[in-house]
Image (cartoon, rainbow, N blue to C red):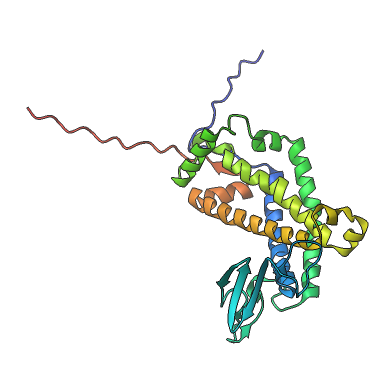
Amino acid sequence: MSDMIDPSPPTGGDLVRRHRRSTRIWHWLNAWILAVMLMSGLMIFNAHPHLYWGQYGANFDRAWFEIGASGGSGTVRMGALTLHTTGLLGLSYGADGHANSVAFPGWITIPSHYSLADARIWHLAFAVLLLVAWPAYVLVSLVNGHVRRDLVITRHEWAPAHIWHDIKEHARLRFPTGAAALHYNILQKLAYGTVLFGLLPLILLTGLTLSPGMDAAWPWLTVLFGGRQSARSLHFLAMLGLIAFFIVHIVMVVLAGPFNEVRSMVTGWYRLPRARHPVIVPAPESGN
């Protein structure tokens, strides 16, 4: 029988291991793949900057979403709502000062000049990487227990009072400290779970639906999503969901301490935040 005493749990200020190697590799690989797919996808969208629902979609059909230029003004229209976006979307200006009537400007697309063929090559090449990397990471996470330990939401966490408490704590920028910072809260679990098991498979499946070869081999995909144009719209919406996640993720990293957060995702080492102790104001002395 061993006489060793179990080490005490880590506290604020301790340097501990936070992320597994598989999580760190997936994080940076996923960021690289999705960045290239986003930028090449925007160039593909430039070829026909309109979205439809249903089986078909052509220039004379009514689009539910479109980006264009009219009368020297860039516009974004969604349903009955029209926004003027001159200088950013629909109509932008190059370094030479000339106006470019494209949905997305060249500084955010791959390639930066208009080329549908090149954009498709980039997009499909990195789509293959994602098609291999995503199921590989899910499988590894199931085997090593990452999904069970870190992403499964417990019955207690589903309680509305618990969710509302976490929302208020985040709104007040009160992040977990000490050992509690090693565990995902309900909002993180919902966000990461939505990306890993919702948005990424939706991106992959709708992307396969848009491939003529896969459409011929697996016609049930087209039926599943209600037509190729519906699949294209869902593909675009899933992309917007990933962009929203990225923006919130970056904001949270900056607010929580970028050096510590990035170090944990590069090396795996993370310094636990110290608890904020309340400031005790001494009571005034009573007079005699």
Percent x, y of residue 198: 71, 48
Between 73 and 283, the residue placed more toward the observer is 73
Q: Which residue is located at x 88 percent, y 64 percent?
A: 212
Location of residue 18 with respect to 283 vertically, above or below: below
- Residue 181 image offset from top left, x and y in percent: 54, 38
Q: Could you tell me which quadrant the C terminus lies in?
A: top left
Image coords of residue 31 (percent x, y): 67, 56
Observer able to see residue 269: yes
**Toward the viewer: 233 or 178?**
233
- Of the pair 201 and 216, the residue shown nearer to us: 216
When asked about the image quadrant of residue 287, the answer is top left
Residue 25 visible in the snapshot = no
Q: Quadrant of the N terminus?
A: top right
State the residue lying farthest toward the left: 288
- Counting labels gives 0
Q: Is residue 141 left or right of residue 4?
A: right
Against 87, residue 197 (above or below) is above
